[in-house]
Structures are given as structure tokens and as C-alpha cells.
């Protein structure tokens, strides 16, 4: 299965779908401490739904990190 996270391609072997939580583990090499938002194919996914929302072949996740400035 092939998915994209912030435009970066990831291949997941032997799976037809994974959860958003599992996909985020592919993207964040180290534990993520800051707040972020996630969109699956352009639709917002709430943090409480990360373990229940499935990512399928060809799907795209956008991980949006806060930007500080003024």
C-alpha cells in the first residue's frame, strides 16, 4: 500500500489499510511533543479519531504544525 504524508511517499507492506495513528508513527521518527492537526484527503481528523480512522492505498495525510511569529 502506498500513502503520502505531507507529500512524502510511504510504502506499507502487507496491509490494505492502517489507522491514522499508525501512519503518524511512520511520519514522526521521534515522539512528537507539539500540537498538530491532521487532514485525511483534505478532511480534518480529530485526535480522538486517530485510532478509528483508516488510511487506504493512495490516500494523503497532511500534518499541520503550528507556526509561531508575529
Image (spheres, rainbow, N blue to C red):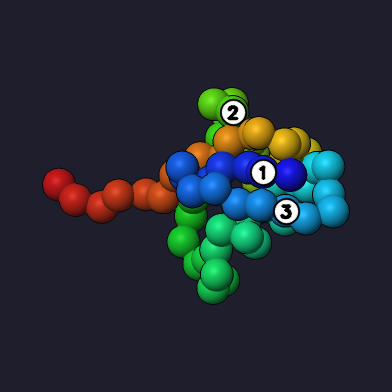
How far apart, in angstroms, are the residues tagged by discs 3 and 1? 6 Å
Instruction: State the image quarter where residue 45 is shown.
Output: top right
Q: Are marks 3 and 1 in contact (CB under 8 Å)?
A: yes
How far apart, in angstroms, are the residues tagged by discs 3 and 2? 18 Å
Near-viewer residue (43 or 10): 10
Q: Earlier in the sequence, mark 3 or mark 1?
A: 1
10 Å neighbourhood of mark 1: few (<14), some, or many (≥20)?
some
Indicate the quadrant containing the N terminus: top left, top right, bottom left or bottom right: top right
10 Å neighbourhood of mark 3: few (<14), some, or many (≥20)?
some
- Say if residue 37 shows up in the picture: no
Q: Earlier in the sequence, mark 2 or mark 1?
A: 1
Helix, strand or loop at label 2? It is loop
Q: Residue 43: x, y in percent?
A: 59, 26
Helix, strand or loop at label 1? It is strand
Helix, strand or loop at label 3? It is loop
The residue identified by callout 3 is 12
Look at 66% across and 52% down and name the residue there: 11
Near-viewer residue (69 or 27): 27
The residue identified by callout 2 is 41
Vertical order, 42 against 57 (above or below): above
Mark sitting on residue 2: 1
Amino acid at each position: 500500500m502506498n500513502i503520502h504524508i505531507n507529500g512524502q511517499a510511504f510504502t506499507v507492506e502487507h496491509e490494505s489499510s492502517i489507522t491514522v495513528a499508525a501512519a503518524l508513527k511512520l511520519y514522526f521518527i521521534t515522539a512528537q511533543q507539539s500540537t498538530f492537526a491532521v487532514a485525511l484527503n483534505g478532511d480534518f481528523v480529530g485526535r480522538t479519531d486517530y485510532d478509528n480512522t483508516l488510511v487506504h492505498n493512495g490516500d494523503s495525510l497532511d500534518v499541520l504544525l503550528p507556526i509561531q511569529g508575529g
